[in-house]
Amino acid sequence: MRSNRLPTVWALLLATSAAFTQSPATATMHVNNVQAKFQADGTLFNDGQQGQFVPMEAGLAQKTLMRHSGIWMVGMDPGLNLKGSVSVNNRSNFQPGGLTQETPFIYDFNKIWKVSCADIQQHLAGYQDNGIVDNPDAALFGFPSQGNSFFEQYNPGLPLPFTPQGLAGFYDSTQDATYDPDKGEYPSMEVRGCALNRYPEEQSWFVFHDRAVHPSSLAPLNMEIQAQVFAYKTPQPSLLNNAVFVRYKLINRSDDLLDSCFVGIYSDFDIGNPDDDFIDCIPDRQIMYGYNGDTNDEDGFGSSVPCNTNWMVVNFVIYETNYFFFCNYTAALKCFLPYDLGEVRGL
């Protein structure tokens, strides 16, 4: 199906190219009714060959709803030179790792760190018992949060960089701006307006950048993007059980300001059989969705056809959270309309 993007205008600061020969690390999230795969270079819902955003709900065929998704950004530097980075169906301008403004400029983080709700609950139970974490969990003690003194012990050969903008979010119970898992601290969702002591069913964190060879021929922005993918699992029926959240934190690593900057999400919807799909949008809710052209998805989902939705939630200057979910429908695509940002934040 023809791919579409939902651009959002941002007032951004900005950020220079290196070859990357490794394959990006991959991870799969399947804690609710969605099985989703993503890569450390920012590629979402693709395993390098085919789409991987699959509804795992009774009565639905296990076929992908999306071929690929990823972040796009363009803007002009003070000299009015157009710069930008895109990710289109396994052709990406991004590579794993983060950026610094000092030599060697790139830190090699080709890895995805994953923590589950069960990991955190076990960690807290052990700490609250006697104030000591008797059985350190590698997922928590090796998490890439600011100042983690245990990081290199659990990630051999990967020094933890220091950045004023921070790394992966965490609950800082000691209020010292340093991640101390031995003091009962743990990874959390770093979303504005949400308390940092909240954690989802599962969360993953990785970092990527555009200081790379660009197949698009666009000049790079020198932008670092920290990504957090997370999902919920609720005991009662809820659209949250059909959703995967992706939160981006964009950090300017160049000395230039960027004017006329556009940031958007590229999404190539494949609703089972991709040859009869359509898209639509709800602009005032920043929602776009893909759906089948009729009630029968030939060679795909058959008569039980879900739709796939991309809900963009923009928080101020450098934060963007996307809410990818699917829902079933018969005649109308209204099942997601009662949900708003306030309800999600209230979890």
Image: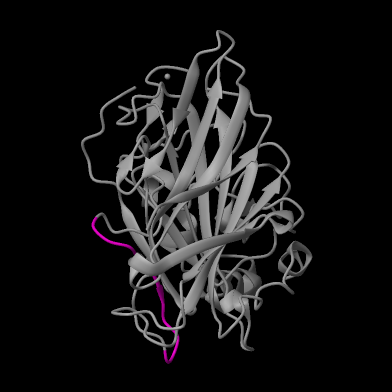
Q: Is residue 201 left or right of residue 346?
A: left
Q: Which residues are magenta?
A: 49-59
Query: Is residue 339 or residue 37 the one in the foreground?
Result: 339
Q: Residue furthest left?
A: 21
Against 101, is 345 above or below? Answer: below
- Provide residue 340's location: percent of width, then percent of height: 74, 66
Q: Residue at x 71, y 67 (%)?
A: 344
Q: Is residue 83 left or right of residue 346?
A: left
Q: Residue furthest bottom?
A: 59
Q: Residue at x 51, y 34 (%)?
A: 73
* Viewport quadrant of the C terminus: bottom right
Q: Residue furthest top?
A: 79
* Viewport quadrant of the N terminus: bottom left
Query: Is residue 251 or residue 51 the one in the foreground?
Result: 51
Residue 101 shows up from this direction: no
Picture colour scheme: one colour
- Provide residue 21's location: percent of width, then percent of height: 21, 36
Query: Is residue 60 or residue 341 the one in the foreground?
Result: 60
Q: Residue at x 39, y 60 (%)?
A: 45
Q: Is 50 within the magenta?
A: yes
In which quarter of the view is residue 325 placed?
A: bottom right
Number of marks present in the image shown: 0
Q: Main secondary structure of the magenta part?
A: loop
Query: Is residue 52 or residue 235 the one in the foreground?
Result: 52
Against 120, is 252 above or below? Answer: above
Against 211, is 68 above or below? Answer: below
Residue 174 shows up from this direction: yes
- Provide residue 287's location: percent of width, then percent of height: 63, 59
- Provide residue 334's location: percent of width, then percent of height: 66, 76
Q: Residue at x 33, y 71 (%)?
A: 273
Q: Is residue 213 left or right of residue 339?
A: left
Against 217, is 192 above or below? Answer: below
